Amino acid sequence: MTDQLASPPTARSAVSAPSLSFGTWAFAFGPFAGDPWDFPRICRWAAAAGYDGVEINGFRPHPHDRDVVLPEDVAAMRTLLAENGLSVSGFAPDLTTTPPALSSERHYLKRIDSCLDFCERIGIPLLRVDTVSAPGPVDETRFAHLVSTWRRAADRSADRGVQLIWEFEPGFWINRPSDVLRLLDEIDHPNFRVLFDTSHAYTGAVAGGRQGPEPEILPGGVVEYAQMLRDHVGHLHLIDSVGVLHDDETSEHLPFGAGAVDFPAVLDALGCAASALPWWTVDFCFWPEVDRDGRDAVPFVRGLRDGLAVRGVR
């Protein structure tokens, strides 16, 4: 992809990679669902807080791939980003009507094509997907269909210069560590990578969140999980956790220092899978005090990045 918005702005190019992005869904879901911040307001906030970019929530009223189509709308969005000195690290679209293990490949890939069109128009290097379906046992027929569907989606994304990223979490199907690793191994596609969210990984590895009556707890916790998946990691969401669920659905995301995640240990376990990434994204989903704590996160995460470089982790 050659679009300039796919990389950090020139004004911040002196900052060593990874650049720091903010997930805009934090101002749309949970406590903000009744009165979400609009996208321009979030961009102004993110720039003022010191972020290099934003990761776009594709649920309306935030930018939806089918809404930003006309040249004038695309130009307005690109201008908004440029005026705030922001790039876009990724796109997390609304895929709720197309669970990949249950939808036909044709239906799912049509939806993916629309998202890829949006990524191309705006200059977005990464497309985030999930299984959509609720947690439950692994049905082998559905599993095989998921492998086939996501392989084809990865092919399509590669043809468009966009990396396809899967975010696993307690609230969606395929949430046990061994099943997560098995799916990645079976898809085995260079353009299909996993998004390692520290809260989801902690809740899955330490608490066995929504894994059923016999959860798969890892003795080494989230650090062991990072070591398991490091060869597959293509993107990173950073946020703290104590392993509890938000509204009994998925991981609760806590401000840095309010949880139990040992971030230096996790980042060391990921090694170059973390240090070589172009972006780290801060994910305050469902957190009511994100306006305050999202600002405080910037120096904390930059400190984590700088500490990783000082330790020479590769």
Image (cartoon, rainbow, N blue to C red):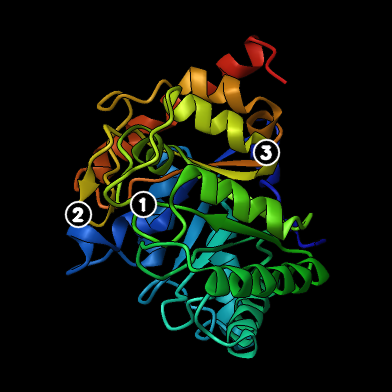
| Kind of element beneath mark 3 | loop
What residue do we see at 80% from left, 62% from top? Answer: 1
Left or right of residue 247, residue 175 in this image = right
Position above or below: 31 against 229: below
Q: The disc labelled 2 sits on which kind of residue?
A: Asp
| Kind of element beneath mark 2 | loop
Q: The disc labelled 3 sits on which kind of residue?
A: Leu
**Can residue 305 be spotted in the picture?**
no
Disc 2 designates what residue?
248
Disc 1 designates what residue?
170
Residue 125, quarter of picture: bottom right
What residue do we see at 27% from left, 62% from top? Answer: 29
Disc 3 designates what residue?
277
Residue 176 image point, x, y percent: 44, 48
State the residue in front, 135 or 80: 135
Residue 268, quarter of picture: top right
Q: The disc labelled 1 sits on which kind of residue?
A: Pro
Mark 1 or mark 3, whichever is nearer to me:
1
User: Callout 2: 10 Å neighbours few (<14), some, many (20+)?
Assistant: few
Residue 122 image point, x, y percent: 64, 69
